[in-house]
Image (cartoon, helix red, strand yellow):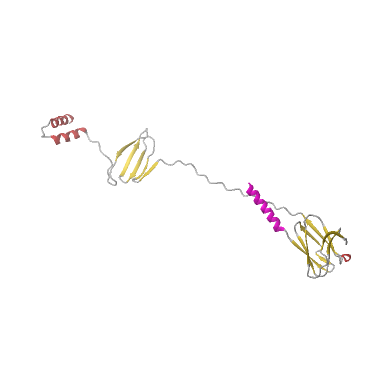
Amino acid sequence: MHTAASLVLVAALAATATTAATVNVDLYDVALTPATVTVNVGDTVVWRYFSTHRIMQVRWAGSCQWNGGFDSGGRGQGATFAFTATAPGTVYYACDYHCNMGAHGTIVPQPQPVPQPQPQQPSPPKPTTANNPAPNSASTAAGSQTTAPGAGAAATTTTTAGTRTATADSAGSQNNIADGPPNSGFTGFAPVPQATIVRGAASSLRGSGTAAGALLAALAAALA
């Protein structure tokens, strides 16, 4: 807030300084060119002498009586004299040497125009980042895994060891079905009947003469 106000004040002062002007009035014998000038407060009037003159402030228009204001004194060709307006109002002056011949002039200082501050441009809104939830994913050195929650939802895990398919039940747990080396075409273990397992064990112990071999042989016969 204070910074913005300071900038406006500096801009106003700078504008006031840059708008101050200088107005020239040329003195040729009895002619004052221009005889009437309108300036702003802070502007300067410079008389340029092309002959001998004495410029002095007078009481009213057409007067030849000095009022105690500015007085250049007698100056010859090539000289100059300056007056800076400090307040609004009409200033009358004359050349003391040529006053009775009509060498009269008028300066009309006006109030310094107040520069209008430039409207402040609103700052663009700052971009906001949406709070998007991150996916339920984990990245490891062996690969990446994404698990979709929910009953019956299936997710595929790709690792350096191969492809694993997991099924999430209604409680959100996973049941691994198969695992195998990549690109091997291996999709899972087929269920093996219990009779086949028992017969294989009985065959390996056949002829051993042990009680275990006899028991497995009897169990295999029962399951056949």
Residue 156, quarter of picture: top left
Q: Is residue 30 left or right of residue 154?
A: right
> Residue visible at 71% across and 56% down?
16
Q: Nearer the viewer, residue 88 or 207?
A: 88
Residue 67, quarter of picture: bottom right
How many marks can you see? 0
Q: Position of residue 27 (x, y in %)?
A: 81, 67
Q: Is residue 192 left or right of residue 119?
A: left
> Residue visible at 14% across and 36% down?
204
Q: Is residue 177 left or right of residue 73?
A: left
Secondary structure, magenta segment, majority class: helix
> Is 32 placed above or below 211 here?
below
Would you say residue 14 sits in the magenta stretch? Answer: yes
> Residue visible at 18% across and 33% down?
198
Q: Nearer the viewer, residue 72 or 131?
A: 72
Q: Position of residue 219 (x, y in %)?
A: 16, 30
Q: Is residue 134 left or right of residue 2?
A: left
Q: Nearer the viewer, residue 106 or 218?
A: 106
Q: Position of residue 47 (x, y in %)?
A: 79, 65
- Image quarter where the C terminus lies is top left
Q: Position of residue 174 (x, y in %)?
A: 34, 36
State the extent of the magenta-drawn residues as a range.
Answer: 1-19
Residue 109, quarter of picture: bottom right
